[in-house]
Image (cartoon, rainbow, N blue to C red):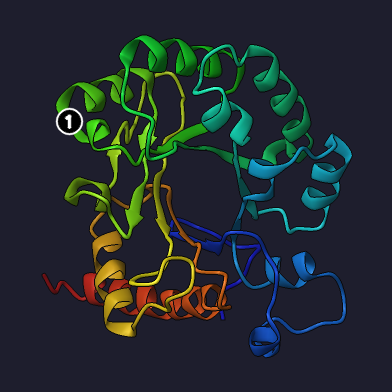
Amino acid sequence: MPAGGSHGHGPRVGTAGWSIPRESAAAFPGEDQHLHRYARVLSCAEINSSFHRSHKASVYERWASSTPPGFRFSAKLPRTISHDSGLVGTKALLARFLDEVAGLGEKLAVLLVQFPPSLAFDAGVVVPFFSDLRRRCTKALVCEPRHASWFDAPAEATLIECRVGRVAADPARVAAAAVPGGWLGPSDDGREAVVYHRWHGSPQVYRSRYEPSWLRARAEDLARWPQGTDRWCIFDNTASGAALPNALEMHTAMDAAAWIRAAGAP
């Protein structure tokens, strides 16, 4: 069974949120809060609720204190920044969010920005936004664009310049969306980078459970990254309760892939 308090150099596997459906309760034993139970088994979680509403810094502090030392969170920027404002005129909104999420302390590892499908790449908007965010925050930054223009060479070059990773998503709206892109590190100034996967469920988004063969293929892909690369796998197929079983199955698949690589198989 994976242990939330110990990460090492292996990929981090978690889900969007940490609710434990009744069907998965046996794998997360205990009578305490869901986050306590979740964090004893898995090594990370993505905070999605921050996209929809504000949380006090004290709430983030409580979440951080509920998890083992090696546990890490990613946090999704509010929709007021990414969707409602389209990244323009967001300084006050961003300052408020960063003040709140600072309650996670060192447990915060990644900030995630998900863009609406309608948001096309515009360097005149993207560069000032990410430059401002970079000045304010030293955490790893990743984005999940969904407009096709983000997968062309100019957008890729801009993300690398801004030191922002591009999420590998499933289902992928275009072929390039299925693999990580943008800035993948390392840097000479201590900035961290992550290889970040978000798997939403396919063919039915947010609901479909991934088959073991699909997970094994993804585990083999992850095993090809250099040792020490900070790799995240977040299952967002939570609507049907499929995310937690898939996360546990992914751990098994990654253990097998690591053994194969160690044995020298191609």
Count of labels shown? 1
Q: Quadrant of residue 263?
A: bottom left
Residue 191 appears at what percent x and percent y?
46, 26
In this picture, residue 74 sits left or right of residue 117: right
**Near-viewer residue (96 or 261):** 96
Query: Can residue 139 be seen here?
Result: no
Residue 249 appears at what percent x and percent y?
44, 81
In this picture, residue 46 sits left or right of residue 39: left
Identified at 77% across, 49% down, the residue is 64
Looking at this view, name the residue that lies furthest to the left: 266
Above or below, comparing residue 192 to residue 130 in the picture: below
Q: Quadrant of residue 199?
A: bottom left
Q: Quadrant of the C terminus?
A: bottom left
**Near-viewer residue (83 or 183):** 83
In this picture, residue 102 sits left or right of residue 200: right
Above or below, comparing residue 188 to residue 11 in the picture: above
For label 1, the SS is loop
Residue 144 appears at what percent x and percent y?
40, 41
Q: Quadrant of the N terminus?
A: bottom right
Residue 222 appears at what percent x and percent y?
30, 60
- Under mark 1, the amino acid is Asp
In this picture, residue 59 sits left or right of residue 223: right
Identified at 58% across, 78% down, the residue is 241
Query: Can residue 79 be seen here?
Result: yes
Label 1 crowd bin: few (<14), some (14–19), many (20+), radius 10 Å: few
In this figure, which residue is indicated by the disc labeled 1?
152
Identified at 75% across, 23% down, the residue is 96
Above or below, comparing residue 237 to residue 29 in the picture: above
**Near-viewer residue (265 or 101):** 101
